[in-house]
Image: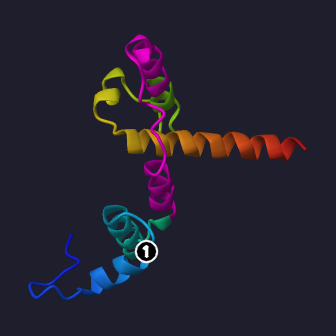
Amino acid sequence: VGALEGDEELTPLGYHLAKLPVDVLIGKMMVYGAIFGCLSPILSVSAFLSYKSPFVYTKDERQNVERAKLTLLNDKQDGPGDGNDIDRQSDHLLMMIAYKRWETILNEVSMLF
């Protein structure tokens, strides 16, 4: 991950990773998210990765899970997806779409009250 030099000294990246209380790969993703200005979605994805994926299913639930994934892809904010999008989307991106959808619904409900 680029955290150590050849003489086992910490690199600048390694110094920052050593201070984060997360897995080193998630930490690296968070550091680069901050560098590239996309920390908010990266923090959400990091949180998703620390919990069991909702897209893990038993054999008899496969059809329901695939239907839920397609619904999320068709409801995403940048327009409807085609049926083949499901094969090109990672669970991480689907979780981000689900989170954004939840956030939108929460804001709509809070405006009612």
Quick one: which residue is furthest to the top in this view? 60
Badge 1 density bin: few <14, some 14–19, many ≥20, Cα 10 Å? some
Q: What residue type is labelled 1?
A: Leu
What x and y, as percent, mark residue 89? 34, 37
Left or right: 108 as drawn, with respect to 4: right
Left or right: 6 as drawn, with respect to 23: left
Q: Check residue 63 for magenta coloring.
A: yes
Instruction: Pick the quarter of the image with the C terminus.
Output: top right
| Residue occupying image coordinates x 33% and y 69% | 28
Quick one: which residue is furthest to the left in this view? 6
Give the colour scheme shown: rainbow
Q: Is the magenta stretch mostly helix, strand or loop?
A: helix
Instruction: Pick the quarter of the image with the N terminus.
Output: bottom left
Left or right: 77 as drawn, with respect to 49: right
Q: Is residue 14 visible?
A: yes
What x and y, as percent, mark residue 14? 28, 80
Look at mark 1 in the image and give the residue it sits on: 20
What are the residue bounds of the magenta stretch? 40-69
- Viewer-proximal residue among 91 and 14: 14
Q: In this view, does 8 lie above or below 39?
A: below
What x and y, as percent, mark residue 6? 9, 84
| Residue occupying image coordinates x 56% and y 44% | 99
In the structure shown, which secondary structural element does the residue marked by tag 1 occupy? loop
Q: Is residue 63 above or below residue 80?
A: above
Q: In this view, does 7 lie above or below 86?
A: below
| Residue occupying image coordinates x 43% and y 50% | 49
What x and y, as percent, mark residue 58? 41, 19
Q: Check residue 18 for magenta coloring.
A: no
